[in-house]
Amino acid sequence: MTCHLLIPAAGSGKRMGADCNKLLLPLLGKPILQWTLEAAIASEAITWIGVMGQPHDYPEFQKIFNEISLLKPIRLIQGGATRQASVFNGLKALPIDCDRVLIHDGARCLVTPELFDRCDLALQEMQGFIVAVPVKDTIKVVDGLTIVDTPNRDHLWAAQTPQGFQLDVIKNAHLTALELGWEVTDDAALLEKVGLAVQIVMGEETNLKVTTPQDLAIAEFILKQRNN
Ligand code: C5P
């Protein structure tokens, strides 16, 4: 069995307030991206990894690849102007024997090898899924600063990655998006827009996305707890 993983890593450090790609910032002495890659390499299921990056980051990415055990093929793929464009580039670069794919944000560096393995199993039965956790807060829909709705919390889940898809299904959804000019922030939204069912796989509370300096501090705390 083969399991291909795409890692979008071609963003910037804007919301982090950094003047470089936030995935290159150090977290307990290692770049954020390295933590994500080490989890992918430790996963029993994953056999091939593609990393989408901006060409100006290639030298730093290559240094990370050299640091970690090269037990699995890792391929650098040029990213795009948006996450969606980066993922589309990744989908086009997958090897010919690939029929299903996991997509995981490089910024979710607390992902565990076990979560990747559970995702691979899920994908053997589903056309598309996302990892998600039930929301803990009450969520408000607002217009300006006025609340217009309070959805029932029982139906609200917070989306994480990995997300997984049969390759033909996600590729066709991306092609339709390109044709119709849809812009989305996760891959599942494209399947939803073309009317295909996407399922939920239970995520992990600690699988946070490092976006702000506070997230970096929380990630550091969680990693220290894990190593105790
Ligand atoms: O900015 P944010 O953290 O939401 O981005 C999610 C993921 O998408 C990150 O891992 C980031 O590196 C990636 N990304 C990308 N190409 C872009 C923008 C973001 O691969 N143009």
Image: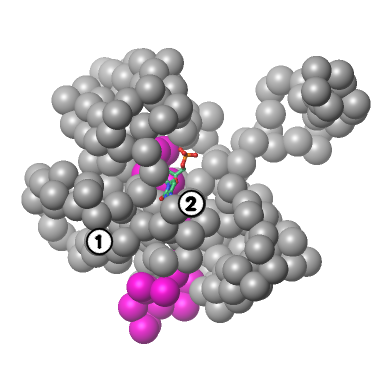
Task: Please count the marks in the image.
Answer: 2
Neighbour class for label 2 at 10 Å: few (<14), some, many (≥20)? some
Q: State the residue lying farthest toward the right.
A: 148
| 47 or 114: nearer the viewer | 47
- Magenta-highlighted residues: 91-109
For residue 178, the mark is: none
**Looking at the image, which residue is at 69% across and 68% down?**
180
> How far is the residue under mark 1 from the one under mark 2?
17 Å
Q: Which secondary structure is most common in the magenta stretch?
A: loop
Q: Where is residue 104 in the image (x, y as percent from the top left)?
A: 44, 50
According to the image, label 2 marks what residue? 82
Q: Residue visible at 55% across and 66% down?
A: 165
Please identify the quarter of the rendering in which residue 155 is found: top right
The type of residue carrying mark 1 is Leu
Looking at the picture, does residue 16 appear above or below residue 119? above
Mark 2: is the Cβ under 8 angstroms from ligand 1?
Answer: yes
Residue 195 locus on image (x, y percent):
78, 66
Dot 2: what SS? loop
